[in-house]
Image: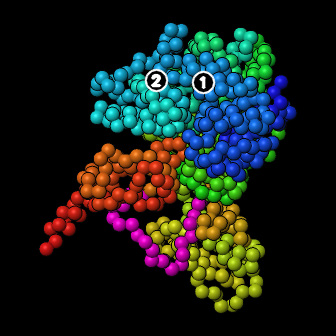
Amino acid sequence: MIESLLVANRGEIACRVFRTCRARGIATVAVHSDADAGALHVREADAAVRLPGAAPADTYLRGDLIVKAALAAGADALHPGYGFLSENAEFARAVLDAGLVWVGPPPGAIEAMASKTRAKELMAAAGVPLLAPVDPATATGADLPLLLKAAAGGGGRGMRIVRELSDVEEELRAASAEAASAFGDGEVFAEPYVERGRHVEVQILADAHGTVWALGTRDCSLQRRHQKVIEESPAPGLPDDLRAVLREAAVAAARAVGYRGAGTVEFLISPQGRPYFLEMNTRLQVEHPVTEEVFGLDLVALQLAVAEGAALPAEPPAAQGHAVEARLYAEDPATGWAPQTGRLHALELPGPELFPVAAAAPRLRVDTGYSDGDTIGVHYDALLAKVIVWAPTRAEALRALRHALRRARVHGPGTNRELLVRSLGHPDVTEGRFDTGFYERHLDALTTPVPGERYAAVAAALADAAARTTGDTLPARLGGWRNVGAPAQRKTYGEHEVRYRATRGGFVVEADGADGADEGDIGDEVQVIAAGPHRVSLEIGGVVRHFEVRAYGDEVHVDSATGAYRLIARPRFSETGHRAPPGSLLAPMPGTVVRLAPGLAEGARVTAGQPLIWLEAMKMEHRVTAPASGTLTALHAVPGRQVEVGALLAVVTDADAQDVQEESSP
């Protein structure tokens, strides 16, 4: 029996495993990097051991340090979570060699499936349908588009789509570098890229006594950068015979490698309905909660029981209803999914009270690794929380999850919350006709600015005025003001200037500033019903709307039933500050410079759109490209150097501007 367990991971999954351990009476041990010293998973554990450093390669990927930490803390078992070393056979062996219980599959099974190239050979021998591999060195136009994939690991890291033969070499280099950074293995392989395919997977669970469960299907097609965003179980719209084929193939894959524990077999479903084996993840998946909710199981508890030698019942429980999970990321979908960092002022996700506790009522669950006041850094994944809803039907689950996300209060760095809300209500999603290219086709429409931001700016300005005036709510009719109306006050948030006056009756909003003039005179359509430091009620076009306002210095968050807004208050008088020269390449996010384009140096000629600098942030590589064709006149980026957002990396002098300068020179 396991008495004390160390989780060789961080964040949400560490907290998730600890939750089950507490319920089973198992003591918990956390490991943490210096960047995670105050993280939620550290605070929730019974004991914690420091891994010196911040980068994953120095901390969570150091199996030797983690095994030593388990022994030092007196743990007798180790759970790897997902990512990092969870699919590393050598690490699993080291854990077992140290006399610890390994809560995972046998090292041999991990090894067999760790390399996707070798896994495909095994599956071919077992008769599982596969995509034919392609040798990148001999690929022709007929092989395009190609999908490059890291042989080790997953999560979209080390994965690239190639549509031009001229890009193969560079994309191979980029995929290999990213894979080596994330998994310590730079091997990459290529296969045909199936356009408009669906990503469907089967959760398996096997014991040491010959029983293998296939726990339904999950659809994970809604992805960005090959990383899942929204998942659901069961996968909608699949014929029964295809479901049977997927379950049988998943069980065959598990038996072929003597699998034990929880794992996932992933398939690509072509538009014609043909399934192709993608890979087997020999670990717990991020999206495991949707399976738990549909089958009424605790997969972590079952992992622990199997590791202790328990036998599974011959058959799993029957599936009921539908579950959908949305991953709330700190990122900006409108700017290439750029990760966002900084202080998380508030993370208030709806609790079970959002829906009544009654038969067949929707059920809400939130798995997170963050809480109020935590800092989102650059070293790790940008996942803030997973919000999961179960309901009797798919339509009810989608609607309830959309409502829960709209009700969430997330203050701090920007997130993909609005994208999730819109995605869950998109006709292609509600009608089940989506595929892995959904965001490529619809991203622009899904990331248009949230309507009504100018009303949020009005609410922010009035809340600020109320806080500075009395600190109490100011009703629409308020005595005590001077008979003569006070002069108009101005407050600017981003591009929205708000003008208002304090009168005997409360506040009056005047006409928009120049920036909002094209939207009509806001002073004619907004009536102030009540204004307090944290809550403002406005009548807009005959409808009363309520706005919750929280200010954190110049950063103001406004939440309403129609949307959430993050506003930055601009100073009343503009300050003269440093302005970057034209053609500047600024760091779009804090991160580490990992490499430069070959031969890049001052004086080099570059072309518009040419990748020049690669930054690594949150385990993903991000390209910084030339804004125009011209000459690199300054280069400040150095591989290995950490940079802050907005840091000047290089300057490209536009070719046309340079020609003008040369012609005008004496």
Which residue is at the front of the view, 494 or 2?
2
Q: Is residue 569 magenta?
A: yes
Q: Residue at x 61, y 18 (%)?
A: 109
Residue visible at 33% across and 32% down?
168
Is residue 98 shown left or right of residue 605? Answer: right
| Residue position for label 2 | 271
Secondary structure of the residue carrying tag 1 is: helix
538 drawn magenta = no
Quarter of the image where one finds residue 547: bottom right
The picture places residue 55, in percent across and down from the top left corner, at: 57, 45
Residue 659 position (above or below residue 593)? below
**Label 2 packing within 10 angstroms: few (<14), some (14-19), many (20+):** few
Q: For the residues marked 2 and 1, what is the alpha-carbon distance in whole angstroms?
A: 35 Å
Q: Amino acid at mark 1?
A: Ala
Q: For the N terminus, which image quadrant?
A: top right
Residue 90, given in percent of the width and then of the height, sits at: 60, 25
> Which percent across, then down, holds residue 572?
53, 78
Amino acid beneath label 2: Pro
Q: Residues within 10 Å of mark 1 (few under 14, many from 20)?
A: many
Residue at image mark 1: 89
Residue 230 image point, x, y percent:
59, 37
- Residue toward you, 609 or 442: 609
Q: Count numbered badges in the picture.
A: 2
Which residues, given as a range, are shown in magenta?
Answer: 565-586
Q: Residue at x 68, y 64 (%)?
A: 550
Q: Seen in the image, is 249 located left or right of residue 354?
A: left
Q: Is residue 100 left or right of residue 152?
A: right
Secondary structure of the residue carrying tag 2 is loop
Q: Residue 228 or 642: which is nearer the viewer?
A: 642
